[in-house]
Structure formats: structure tokens, C-alpha cells
């Protein structure tokens, strides 16, 4: 009797993660086709009058990227950590965490950097880095790994914010990490289940 062969199939195992990465790639391609006009209209957050497009940008800036290198750097960690978080907390909770981080980091940019535009998923990625370190967070216990991650990543961003002059928003990274810590703390209390 011939041994049955297992058929390999592709699995859309982390729908929020995969859809986010795909949509961000499409946004990047359309941005290149439109010479950045679509990105500026919908996927960069900056101080402007309150309008429909301003609200879209508040959420959508995490989907915009300046170039493929920017996109690839964010998506490597996003695709690595996203499935873990979706599996642990569920797709809808993970999507909410992304939305909260996008809005909070967008508002921080508008308030503190009125002359700068913000785009990219790095704030969300920092939220994910801290949140994944909080996966085993239990009431009354704080994992040392979470403390080290916060100290290393957020500490390095504070250092870079003070010492390096570049176009990277370290404050957004810090805000993303703080969102991850806050969301991790809320989720560890059992307030959310997978779903």
C-alpha cells in the first residue's frame, strides 16, 4: 500500500498581518506612480484643517512608506511578529491595537511636530515589539524580557532622539512602544480574548 502523500497548501494564516503588508505595498506602488501625490493626500499625517482626508491620514499614515527600503525594513518585523500577536490576541484585537497606535502616534506628530509629515509603520512595529514581549504577562508578574525590550528599544530611541539628527521620528517609535506596553497591560488583565 502506497503511503499517502500530504498535499501542501498555502494558508492565509494571519489575515490582518498579511493584508496590512499587501495594502502597504499597493500604497507604495501607487505612491510611486502618482509621484507621491496619493501618499501626501492619504498616507502622511501632518497638521492641517480637520477634514475627511485628515481623518483618513490619521489612520492611513502607517500604510505609507517613502520607498521600498523603508517598506521592507518595517515589514520584516511586522511579518515576523504579526502572526504571533494575531494568534495570541485574535485578529480583531490586533487590528484595534494597530488603529490605536496609528491614531496616538499621528496625534503626537501633529501636536509636537506641526511642520513635519509622518508616514510608515515603524510606530506600529515598536508597539508590536513591546506587545510580543508582554505575551506571557500575568497579573502580578512582569517578565524580565519585557523590561529588557523596553529598556533596549525605547532607551536607544531616546538616545537617538537626543544625539542623532535624521528624518526618523524617534518620538513615534517611543509612542509606539508605550502603546504596546499599555495595550499589553490591558490585555493581560483578561479583558480581551482571541477573536
Image (cartoon, grey):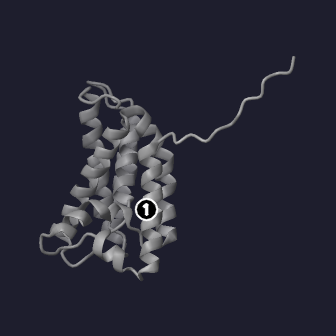
Residue carrying label 1: 24
Residue at the spot 28% in from the left edge and 62% down from the top edge: 171
Q: Position of residue 153 (x, y in %)?
A: 39, 53
Q: Quadrant of residue 91?
A: top left
Total labels: the figure holds: 1
Q: Position of residue 105 (x, y in %)?
A: 25, 59
Q: Quadrant of residue 85?
A: top left
As drawn, the residue found furthest toward the top would be: 1
Kind of element beneath mark 1 = helix
Neighbour tally class for label 1: few under 14, some 14-19, many 20 plus, Cα within 10 Å: many
Q: Is residue 192 left or right of residue 90?
A: left
Q: Is residue 87 left or right of residue 193?
A: right
Instruction: Please tell me which residue lies in front, 83 or 11.
Output: 11
* Location of residue 144 with respect to 82 vertically, above or below: above
Q: Position of residue 187 (x, y in %)?
A: 28, 33
Residue at the spot 52% in from the left edge and 55% down from the top edge: 76
* Location of residue 158 with respect to 35 vertically, above or below: above
Amino acid at each position: 500500500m502506497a503511503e499517502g502523500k500530504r498535499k501542501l497548501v498555502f494558508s492565509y494564516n494571519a489575515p490582518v498581518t498579511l493584508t496590512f503588508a499587501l495594502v502597504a505595498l499597493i500604497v507604495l506602488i501607487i505612491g510611486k506612480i502618482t509621484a507621491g501625490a496619493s501618499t501626501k493626500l492619504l498616507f502622511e499625517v501632518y497638521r492641517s484643517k480637520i477634514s475627511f482626508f485628515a481623518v483618513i491620514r490619521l489612520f492611513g499614515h502607517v500604510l505609507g512608506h517613502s520607498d521600498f527600503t523603508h517598506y521592507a525594513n518595517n515589514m520584516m518585523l511586522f511579518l515576523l511578529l504579526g502572526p504571533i500577536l494575531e494568534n495570541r490576541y485574535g485578529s480583531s484585537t490586533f487590528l484595534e491595537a494597530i488603529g490605536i497606535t496609528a491614531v496616538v502616534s499621528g496625534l503626537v506628530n501633529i501636536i509636537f511636530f506641526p511642520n513635519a509629515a509622518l508616514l510608515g509603520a515603524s510606530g506600529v512595529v515598536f508597539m508590536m515589539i513591546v506587545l510580543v514581549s508582554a505575551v506571557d504577562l500575568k497579573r502580578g508578574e512582569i517578565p524580565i524580557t519585557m523590561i529588557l525590550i523596553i529598556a533596549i528599544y525605547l532607551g536607544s530611541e531616546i538616545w537617538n532622539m537626543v544625539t542623532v539628527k535624521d528624518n526618523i521620528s524617534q518620538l513615534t517609535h517611543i509612542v509606539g512602544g508605550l502603546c504596546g506596553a499599555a495595550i499589553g497591560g490591558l490585555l493581560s488583565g483578561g479583558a480581551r480574548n482571541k477573536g
